[in-house]
Amino acid sequence: MHDDRDVTALGSAAMGVMFYVMSYGHPSSWGARREAHAVHHAAGAIPSGPESDLLNAASARVRLGGASLIPEVDMEIGDNAMVLRKQGEESILKALPVLDAMGEAGRDQAREWLLGVAEKVAHAAKDVDGNDDRVSDDERMAIGEVARLIGAA
């Protein structure tokens, strides 16, 4: 059984990843809903490894009540992209002590999970500007920044 604070921190980090990537994607409210659905789906894709139980618990927290994991942010981001990005970054950074407490294999597994969330969210924004299924350069940059934040780059 894992500490509930660790579960919450990792679940919040997954939601933070969504906000961080969204802030670069300029989604419409429909795009934001698609990205929220993508994080719900991606959260369930747990890579195998020693922290599977903890990540499954964090994933369940996201899927059951992800929006409650971080303070409410207006999904119509418009001029609020920086607010959304800052909130996402803060949520990601709060999970770093949990990652630091894991062994190397567990850290790698958690990082892979969070980066998977980032990729799914970026792909969900494909409706913006007729972007079909490509990830925009801005979203690719956001994924790289998420990787840097979690120590995977």
Image (spheres, rainbow, N blue to C red):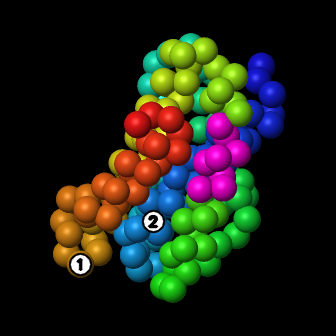
Looking at the image, which is closer to me, 47 or 107?
107
Q: Is residue 70 above or below residue 82?
A: above
Q: CA gap, disc 2 to disc 1?
A: 14 Å
**Along the line of sight, which residue is nearer the eye, 68 or 146?**
146
Q: Is residue 140 left or right of residue 60?
A: left
Residue 42 among those drawn in magenta: no
User: Which residue is rendered at x = 37% and y = 69% of the image?
Assistant: 25
| Comes first in the chain, label 2 or label 1 | 2
Above-or-below relation of 105 to 39 = above
Amino acid carrying mark 1 in the image: Asp
Residue 151 appears at what percent x and percent y? 50, 35
Residue 14 vertical position relative to residue 136 in the rendered view, above or below: above
Position above or below: 102 against 62: above
Quadrant of image for the C terminus: top left
Q: Give x and y (percent) for residue 94.
A: 70, 45
* Amino acid tagged 2: Met
Q: Which residue is mark 2?
A: 22
Q: Quadrant of residue 103?
A: top right
Identified at 59% across, 59% down, the residue is 88
Check disc 1 and report its element: helix, strand or loop: helix
Q: Secondary structure at mark 2?
A: helix
Identify the image quadrant of residue 59. top right
**Residue 91, magenta (yes or no):** yes
Principal SS element in the magenta part?
helix
Q: Going by the picture, which residue comes out furthest to the bottom?
A: 79
The stretch in magenta equals 89-96
Quarter of the picture containing the N terminus is top right
Q: Residue visible at 65% across and 37% down?
A: 96
Which residue is the site of mark 1?
A: 129
Q: Residue at x 29, y 75 (%)?
A: 128
